[in-house]
Amino acid sequence: MATDQQLVVQVGYPVWGRVHLILGALLILSGLGVLARNNVAPVTGIVLAALCALVNLAFIGAHPLWAVVVIAVDVVIIYAMTSAGGWAAGER
């Protein structure tokens, strides 16, 4: 595990924890919006998933395997949101 000074963005682990919790909560809210068929929710989900991937890229020095797994999940989320078709593309 890397120390605070060895991370790409040199902030403490508590700050990273808060960032991950806030992003996770926002992604859950976006997911609930998608389930409720809100038109803004897929776009919000794509933006938040991309932001989450960037945050995990910056955090890769601390937990490389976990960061790569989360980035892969974010890519799948972005792919699913952009290729969903149906109501996301305007059909209801």
Image: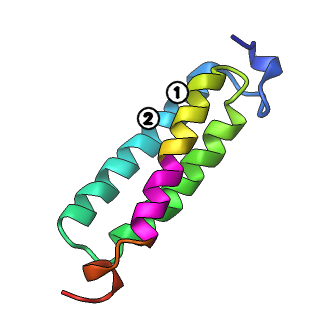
Number of residues whose C-alpha sits closer than 10 Å to that of mark 2, classed few (under 14), some (14–19) or many (20 or more): few
Give the alpha-carbon distance from disc 1 to disc 2, as whole Å.
Answer: 6 Å
17 shown above or below 2: below
Q: Residue at x 52, y 63 (%)?
A: 47
Q: Quadrant of the N terminus?
A: top right
User: Could you tell me the amino acid type at mark 2?
Assistant: Leu
37 shown above or below 70: below
In terms of image quadrants, where is residue 15?
top right
> Residue 21 — which label?
2
Q: Is residue 77 magenta?
A: yes
Q: Are marks 1 and 2 in contact (CB under 8 Å)?
A: yes
> Residue 7 — which label?
none
Q: Residue at x 40, y 62 (%)?
A: 80
User: Could you tell me the amino acid type at mark 1?
Assistant: Gly
Is 52 displayed left or right of 37 in the figure?
right
Q: Which residue is mark 1?
A: 17
38 shown above or below 65: below
Magenta range:
74-82
Q: Residue 13 placed where, x, y %?
A: 62, 20
Secondary element under disc 1, as helix, strand or loop, is helix
